[in-house]
Amino acid sequence: MCGICGTLHLNNSAPKLATVDRMLDKLAQRGPDHSGSFSDGPVALGHQRLAIIDLSKHANQPMIDNGPGLVVVFNGTIYNYPALRKQLQKMGHEFFSRSDTETILKAYAAWGERCVEYLHGMFAFAVWDIHNQTLFLARDRLGIKPLYFSRNGNRFYFASNTQALLTTGDINTAIDPVGLHHQLALHGVIPAPRTILKGISRLAPATTLTIGPDGRELKRTYWQPQARRPATPWTEKEWCDAIKQSLQQAVGKRLVVADVPVGVLLSGGLDSSLLVALLADTGVNDILTFSIGFEDIGSERGSEFEYSDQVAKHFNTRHHKIHIPNDTVLDRLPEAVANMAEPMVGQDAVAFYLLAEQVSRQVKVVQSGQGADELFGGYFWYPLMAAEQNGSEVERFAKHYFDRDHKEYLQIVTAAYRGEDYTRNKIAELLAVPGADSLMDKVLRLDVTTLIVDDPVKRVDNMTMAWGLEARVPFLDHELVELALQMPPELKLKDGGKYPLKTIARGLLPDAVIDRPKGYFPMPALKYLRGPFLEFMQEILHSDACRNRGLFEPAYVEKLLASPEQHFTRIKGSKLWHLALLELWLQLNVDSA
């Protein structure tokens, strides 16, 4: 887990290392253990290291392999690197470190751009080929690790976050109307390659980008999962047994591949509790677990300690409970938003930021349960979509998922940002991708391959890496994802959703944890905006910066401010928080760049 950046000049000029140094300053928190840079003709690369595998200096980056003339900067973890290393050694490749980073270099030397097909894990990396003067960028199959880029004429930049790119002073920071539409309709999700800013793009998951010496760009998608039934039908037991085995393997390899202790973020929900159970079931002792809670608001509970305590006691974990009062949340809110690579409206983003601060004092690596709800149908809107009979596929999806319909969107933004119903068009396009048997197959595949990438997964990476903490997500192991997407959706949705996981958990976890109502990472103060929190939102939306930006229609803003608890999205998000968060993010990250 690290931070990477670089720049490539395509006009035969040499970039300044000072540019890379500025970018590294904005990536330092992602990798506090070592900082390094490299330059060669038209390219300059930078790296901030969080040492997890091979803690020696031999694994520092940028890593150079003089034999084939390759240089790499890498963020992530390759879980199959020991086996891959042996395979490459048999092919004649010699290694000078024990790192997974070097495995990428040797794999690229052996297989070129196809090297990504051999890598199992989470990764974003760049390889500079000294001899051929080409830059190769790659991102993992599920987009667990971020990779942003920008091209301005003959200058190309890339980095692990947008803040690093903005330090170059060479980025078009105008708001992209298409990205804005997605931001306000998909609760902060903007499908790649777009972002909220016109001048910054995101490399899509499962995608590589090669830039040749002539400046030409070649993109390739190397993985696209199918959501179709096996040729021979499986029984319910066969499905559950196969999922359990695959999940056990995913959890195990994310524990073993580390030279430092690994903890678990234990929310008290089924997903994270099951991770603890599977670790214990495989004989792991002395498990470190971490839970966070906030103040209640009315009947809305701010913690799930009732359940996380049961799990910690059941498995005798070394448990850490962290309680955060609301005044601390408000004080730290701008700090958390300043660390968001993009505006993230999910209230658990701030929770993860505050949790990661405490956890990073104990461990460098944690496992987390993100992806289970999307993969196994755990959210309340999935049964609603499945039961919906009226309208086209995109209409059935939008009715239960979009934060706002296009008509309302046109009331929110000023004339300069109005246009087509970009989000409906994009979702229709993604649902129409071949390789899925039914609407729910299409929806669950869309969630896992697109929406989750830029919602919970992005939040977890940003907020944990803000404290130099690596979060590993076993439910997004690509082999488990491939298997689960073939499962009939009705089996996933059985008994309120996540039926296979509940079946696996039975006998491993207390029944009270398995049978509890679905919970969400609770932070009521950012859902029910009252008192100081409401005053804070008013200050943001009434600020000179907001008025001068001219993004939102004042009448719509005043309607939300007048009665914030009467305006929630279809999936129970605060519409006022959505607007205030976006404006605050722009002020802290773009206006101040």
Image (spheres, grey):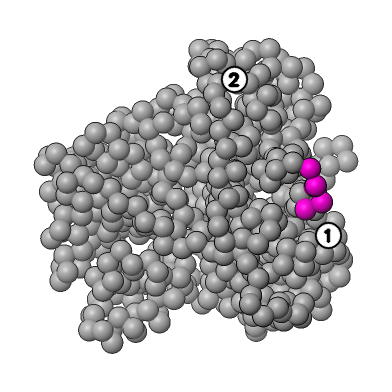
Residue sitting at x 23%, y 38%: 155
Q: Quadrant of residue 269?
A: bottom right
Residue 496: assigned label:
1
Residue 546: assigned label:
none
Tag 1: residue type? Gly
Tag 2: residue type? Val
- Residue at numbered disc 2: 413
- Residue 224's spot in the image, x, y percent? 50, 61
Left or right position of 409 against 211: right
- Residue 501 visible in the picture: yes
Q: How many marks?
A: 2
Left or right position of 494 against 368: right
Residue sitting at x 54%, y 30%: 180
Q: Is residue 387 magenta?
A: yes
Q: Are marks 2 and 1 in contact (CB under 8 Å)?
A: no
- Residue 405's spot in the image, x, y percent? 69, 30
Residue sitting at x 52%, y 43%: 191
Q: Mark 1 or mark 2, which is nearer the start of the sequence?
A: 2
Quadrant, the C terminus: top left
Q: Which residues are magenta?
A: 386-390
- Residue 52's spot in the image, x, y percent? 43, 67
Residue sitting at x 64%, y 55%: 442
